[in-house]
Amino acid sequence: MCGIFGVSVKSTNEYTGNNIKKITKILFKLSESRGKEAAGLAAKNKDSIDVLKLPVSASCLLKSSQYKKFSANVFNKKDGTDKDGFLTVIGHSRLATHGTENFNRNNQPVIKENAVCVHNGIIANDRELWKRFPVLKQEYEVDTEVLVGLLQFFLKETGSITSATQKTFGEIEGSASLAMLFNNNQLLLLATNTGSLYIYDDPAKNIFLFASERYILEQLIGKIRGIDSFKQKFIQQLSPGTALAFDVQTLDKNKFSFLNKDQTINVPVISHNKVGFVDYSEEQTPVHSFSAPTTVKNFNIRPEIKKTMYDNWNRLYSAEILKRCTKCLLPETIPFIDFDDQGICNFCRNHKNLQLKGEKALEEIVFKYRKTDGKPDCLVPFSGGRDSTYGLHYIKKVLKMNPVAYTYDWGVLTDVGRRNEARICGKLGIEHIIISADIRTKRNNIRKNLKAWLKKPELGTVPVLMAGDKQFWYYAEWLKKKMKIDMMIYSRGNGFEDDPFKVGFAGVRMKSSSLPIPLISIIDKIKLAKYYTKEYILNPAYINRSLFDTIFSFFSFLILPDRNPYLYHYIKWDEQELLKTIINEYNWETESDTKATWRIDDGTAPFYNYIYMTVAGFTEFDTFRSAQIREGDIDRETAYGLIKEENKPRFESIEWYARTIGFDPNKAIERVNSVSKIYKIQ
């Protein structure tokens, strides 16, 4: 989720303050790709623990006046003053999940109960833990706080860092990789339940390094040759369920498993004289933070607008307004649809049942890449949605692979999606790498494109609202190469999610298939490019700062070659079996404002589906359930009941989207409602 890192030196005689400053700066910048919404540092020496955190990116923090003060106190002291001249620095580059970064108290490092902590991951059950442990006092919104509180609570109870770590991780649900310093002892604790921690530990050197990714330490080694000679062979992963406690003054280390409660190793905590916390942070409104337009008073949908939205939905299902296929449920407003004398649509007439390649063929493929030493052997794109969650489960538990989960966060991954990602990665012990876009810029781009779309609403240009996430494809290939992983498995393309209407409204007739859209013909790609070029000329509001981002997205999604296997092209996608598995085994969370389980990880879906429903009379759910009918997985009556429920306006989720992006949902919905329908209202 975020990037954490650190450096610890035994004596400043060997490594000067400037050496450590340079290493810290490099680690900070290399970790920035994992989160750009806030950044922070904590440094411990024999006199104090100095802390700096700001609601800006790492690059911005390093240019700040506060960092200059922090640096002068931490790194610029005279070197080698005495034998106790040790120094440990831990850092954090934040992708905000719990608690807005605009309130600096929610940012990291988190100071609580005589400890300071940086944490990568999400504690999905933090609310329940606060209730179960009322002795802990909640002061912030960030979930890391309960992690620190629990560990300190159990540390006082047991006097052992081993027992405290075991008990803490036994209580949490979700993912956690952490580094923690204490002001009354000399320990640095590293612990992870996903394996998202890598250390550099050369016994011949009086320096210790750690980071969230192996690649970060590899790049660091190449950039600090002028300081010392470091070798990649000393980089090692802390495996899931492993912790490392060591004395920052002596660098003596104790590694232990917190999954094995019968383990005999015990690391008692030896108290030292307390040192004070020196905080260089300032509680302030960040200069570089995203903020909604000042004209937006709030992001709640007014009761009368909700009634209109509900009436639009109810009108579609209270009477037979739309002519629908008598076999499936596709309505007459689907682009390029036609019906025969029996009322059966051309999609049904031309349908051929999905031909799965089979589990045997999949096993033959993965066998070539499977590793038996526990090292990563495949990259799995992961959104936290139902398909990718089950896919990660299947790849790990059934195929017996050692996957690394990958997420591209472009700013509208929902809170539910993020919590579900944390749950399965924590439960399965899977390393999770999130590449974070510049969230504020991405959200600003979405707002600009939404504003442009509302000026000239066209169903064919609705996908421009989702353009920002398409770079997911580019970074997947980039990460695969960076990590030197030869295989990537996608958990999408199940054959039911085929929605050619999105390009159909742009004048492109795409054949129905279970293949992903990038495999459409070159001619159709050119048609799409021409359509969007025309619309951008007709509506110059689209020509804004987001243009380059949109072009990059088009390239990533439609131009880049994709030769990776798709899990659901080999195994049957069974909705009931899938949901039963991920809910029962991983406590997979559903949304509160819908019974639907599809797209709940995507914050844009409730809004664009309302557009499609209002203007065209159908949504993605209509095409999805119709595809299931054709395959014989569901009957028409049941499917109709499902789409009626799934197409209900999702008020809470649309409000979340408006609040996240920064637009007035009332004005936006009123504009959508005013668009001419492509069906007749009787």
Image (spheres, rainbow, N blue to C red):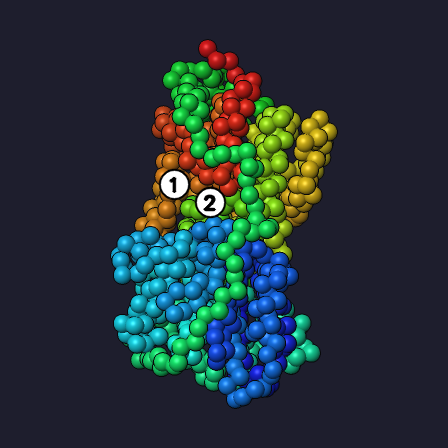
Q: Is residue 399 left or right of residue 440?
A: left
Helix, strand or loop for disc 2 = loop
Asked if the residue under mark 2 is in contact with the one under mark 1, i.e. CB atoms within 8 Å, the reply is yes
Residue at position x 52%, y 44% in the image: 412
Few, some or many C-alpha atoms within 10 Å of disc 1 (few <14, some 14-19, many ≥20)? some
Q: Is residue 546 left or right of residue 364?
A: right
Residue at the spot of label 1: 591
Snapshot quadrant of residue 303: top left
Residue 590 is situated, as x and y percent measured from the top left of the image, at 37, 43
Residue at position x 26%, y 58% in the image: 134
Residue 387 is situated, as x and y percent measured from the top left of the image, at 45, 46
Residue 164 is situated, as x and y percent measured from the top left of the image, at 32, 71
Helix, strand or loop for disc 1 = loop
Mark sitting on residue 414: 2
Disc nearer the start of the sequence (1/2): 2
Residue 279 is situated, as x and y percent measured from the top left of the image, at 49, 66
Q: Is residue 365 left or right of residue 544?
A: left
Q: Amino acid at mark 2?
A: Thr
Q: Is residue 412 above or below residue 314?
A: below
C-alpha separation, residue under disc 1 versus residue under disc 2: 10 Å
Mark sitting on residue 62: none
